[in-house]
């Protein structure tokens, strides 16, 4: 009887754990085919783009202007201080979004291969 109770309890906890796994992509991974896609330089704002601030944050260069990015995190695409991380190299990305309060609010962000 104890084995049956333990078995049922374990499957209950597994089921509850799976219930909290998100089943949709984050907003910045969905492309809107009605909006223009920009190819930009993406990197760490403070390490590579000499932007104000001490914290390593994702930034883009769009039309020769630099903007911090809201939405994706700098570590969503690997470690920021790894060999090809945003703090070490400037990468190309495809983005969609708009500029709000001097920040780029990304609705789509796709890092392009090196």
Image: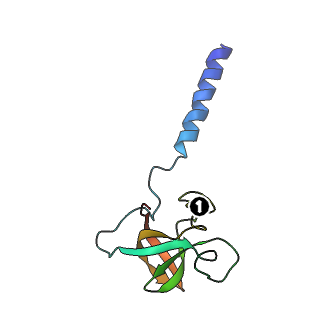
Q: Position of residue 94 (x, y in %)?
A: 40, 69
Residue corresponding to mark 1: 75
In the rendered image, residue 57, in percent from the top left (x then y), is placed at 61, 71
Q: Residue at x 49, y 76 (%)?
A: 105
Give the answer, above or below, for where 6 lies relative to 105: above
Q: Furthest residue to the right?
A: 54
- The reply, left or right, for residue 29 in relation to residue 85 is left
Q: What is the total number of numbered labels drawn onto the structure image? A: 1
Quadrant into which the N terminus falls: top right
Quarter of the image for residue 43 reads bottom right
User: Is 74 rendered above or below residue 16?
Assistant: below
Q: Closer to the camera, 1 or 7? A: 7
Quarter where residue 108 is shown:
bottom left
Q: Position of residue 19 (x, y in %)?
A: 53, 43
Q: Which residue extends farthest top?
A: 1
Name the one closer to the observer, 46 or 88.
88
**Residue visible at 61% across and 21% down?**
7
Residue beneath the point at 71% across and 76% down: 54
Within-10-Å neighbours for mark 1: few <14, some 14–19, many 20+: some
Q: Quadrant of residue 13?
A: top right
Task: Look at the numbered disc 1 and give the secondary structure of its residue.
Answer: loop
């Amino acid at each position: 009887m104890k084995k049956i109770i333990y078995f049922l309890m374990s499957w209950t906890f597994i089921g509850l754990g799976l219930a909290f796994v998100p089943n949709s992509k984050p907003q910045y991974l969905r492309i809107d085919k009605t909006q223009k896609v920009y190819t930009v330089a993406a990197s760490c704002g403070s390490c590579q783009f000499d932007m104000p601030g001490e914290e390593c944050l994702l930034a883009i260069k769009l039309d020769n202007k630099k903007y911090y990015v809201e939405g994706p995190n700098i570590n969503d695409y690997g470690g920021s201080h790894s060999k090809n991380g945003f703090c070490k190299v400037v990468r190309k990305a495809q983005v969609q979004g708009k500029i709000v309060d001097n920040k780029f609010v990304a609705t789509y962000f796709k890092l392009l291969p090196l």
